[in-house]
C-alpha cells in the first residue's frame, strides 16, 4: 500500500531500527525491491532521483508504475514513493505526479534561502498529504549529478530547518554518496549527537550514502536516532556483478539466454538478496 513516510519513520525511531530507502532505476529494480521487502515484511521507501525519474520518462510514469505494481504484486507492506534530492521545481512536479513523499535538497543554498524554500514546500507537501525530508550540510560525493563536499552539518542550522515542521531531516555527518574512498574518516558521531541534542529526540534523522558504511557504524548511527538509511550504489554494484558473470559465462549465447527476461534475472535476483541483507542490518524486518 502506498503511504506517506511519516508514520513508518516515527515507528522506526521509537523502535530503534531504520527503514531502508532503496533507490529505483527501472521496472526490474522496482520489482526486486518490492518483492524483497514483502518477503521480509519490511516497510520501504522507494527513492527516485531526478535523473532516474527522467530516465523512466517522467515522475508521472514512475508513480503510475509503482502504484500498479504495488497492486499487481499484492504488496501488503507500507511503501512510500519518495523524491530523492529534489530541486524546488522537481518537488512540485512530484507532488502533482502522485508521489507520497518528497525530499527537498536545499543544502546548496545559503541557509536563509534553504529555510525560505523549505518552509514553502513543507506547507505544499503537507497540504497534499505528503511527508517531506529536508537537508542541511551537503552529503559528499555525487548522487546523480548532485555533488556535495561531505561536510558535517551545523547543529544550529539543523535546528532552524527542523523547526519548520519537516517530517525527517538529512544532516551531513561525514557520509558520502557512492563508493567510500580508502582514506575516509568514518561517520562523525559527535556531530550526530550534537544535532540530536539541538533538534530534540522526536525528529527522525536520515543517513544518505548508506552503501559501504561498516556495519558497526550503521548500528551506532541507528542507536543515535537515524531512522532512514538510503542505499543506491550497492544495489547497482551487485546488479552489475551478476549481469557481468552471466555474460562472461556465455549464458546469453546459450538457448534464448539473450532474452532480456533471462539476461536481467541474475541482476534482479542479486538486488533482492542485497535488499534482504540491508533489511536485516537495519532491523526493519517484521516491522510492517
Ligand atoms: P549510495 O549510492 O551511496 O548508497 O547513496 C544513496 C543515497 O544516499 C541516495 O540519496
Image (spheres, rainbow, N blue to C red):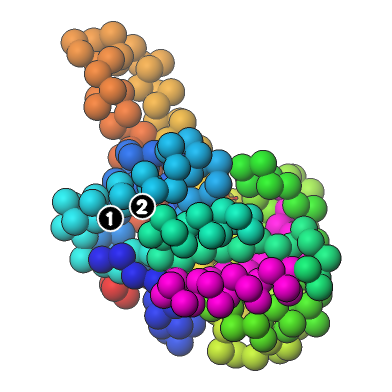
Magenta-drawn segment? 114-141
Residue at numbered disc 2: 63
Which label sits on residue 138?
none
Position of the N terminus, as image quadrant, is bottom left
Q: Is residue 146 visible?
A: yes
Q: Is residue 173 visible?
A: no
Where is residue 133? Give x, y as percent: 57, 70
For the residues bearing labels 1 and 2, Cβ distance under 8 angstroms: yes
Secondary structure under tag 1 reads helix
Q: Quick one: label 2, few (<14), some, or many (20+) residues within 10 Å?
A: some
Q: Residue at x 28, y 15 (%)?
A: 258
Nearest the viewer among 104 and 207 is 104
When the figure is inspected, residue 67 is found, relative to residue 104, above or below; the finding is: above
Residue at numbered disc 1: 67
- Asked whether residue 96 is drawn in magenta, I would say no
Relative side of 117 to 270, left or right = right
When the figure is inspected, residue 125 is found, relative to residue 93, above or below; the finding is: below
Nearest the viewer among 159 and 192 is 159
Where is residue 162? Give x, y as percent: 66, 81
Relative side of 227 to 71, left or right = right
Q: Residue at x 48, y 57 (%)?
A: 94
Q: Quick one: label 1, few (<14), some, or many (20+) residues within 10 Å?
A: some
Q: Residue at x 46, y 31 (%)?
A: 240
Q: Which of the 4 image quarters holds residue 199?
A: bottom right
Q: Residue at x 74, y 68 (%)?
A: 114
Secondary structure under tag 2 reads helix
Amino acid at each position: 500500500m502506498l503511504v506517506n513516510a511519516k508514520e513508518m519513520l516515527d515507528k522506526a525511531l521509537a523502535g530503534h531500527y531504520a527503514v531502508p530507502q532503496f533507490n529505483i532505476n527501472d521496472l526490474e529494480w522496482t520489482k526486486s525491491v518490492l518483492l524483497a521487502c514483502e518477503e521480509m515484511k519490511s516497510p520501504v521507501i522507494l527513492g527516485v532521483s531526478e535523473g532516474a525519474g527522467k530516465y523512466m520518462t517522467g515522475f508521472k510514469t514512475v508513480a503510475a508504475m509503482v502504484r500498479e505494481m504495488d497492486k499487481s504484486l499484492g504488496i501488503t507492506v507500507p511503501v512510500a514513493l519518495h523524491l530523492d534530492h529534489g530541486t524546488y521545481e522537481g518537488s512540485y512536479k512530484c507532488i502533482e505526479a502522485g508521489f507520497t513523499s518528497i525530499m527537498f535538497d536545499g543544502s546548496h543554498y545559503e541557509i536563509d534561502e534553504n529555510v525560505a524554500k523549505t518552509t514553502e514546500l513543507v506547507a505544499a507537501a503537507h497540504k497534499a498529504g505528503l511527508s517531506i525530508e529536508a537537508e542541511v550540510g551537503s552529503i559528499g560525493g555525487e548522487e546523480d549529478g548532485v555533488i556535495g563536499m561531505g561536510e558535517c552539518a551545523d547543529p544550529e542550522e539543523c535546528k532552524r530547518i527542523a523547526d519548520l515542521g519537516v517530517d525527517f531531516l538529512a544532516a551531513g555527518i561525514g557520509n558520502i554518496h557512492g563508493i567510500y574512498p580508502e582514506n575516509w574518516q568514518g561517520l562523525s558521531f559527535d556531530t550526530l549527537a550534537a544535532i540530536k541534542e539541538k533538534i530534540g529526540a522526536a525528529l527522525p534523522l536520515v543517513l544518505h550514502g548508506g552503501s559501504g558504511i561498516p556495519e558497526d557504524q550503521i548500528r551506532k548511527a541507528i542507536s543515535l536516532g537515524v531512522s532512514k538509511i538510503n542505499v543506491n550504489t550497492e544495489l547497482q554494484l551487485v546488479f552489475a556483478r551478476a549481469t557481468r558473470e552471466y555474460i562472461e559465462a556465455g549464458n546469453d549465447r546459450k538457448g534464448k539466454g539473450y532474452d532480456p527476461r533471462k539476461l536481467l534475472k541474475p541482476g534482479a535476483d542479486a538486488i533482492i538478496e542485497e535488499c534482504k541483507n540491508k533489511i536485516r542490518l537495519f532491523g526493519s524486518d517484521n516491522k510492517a
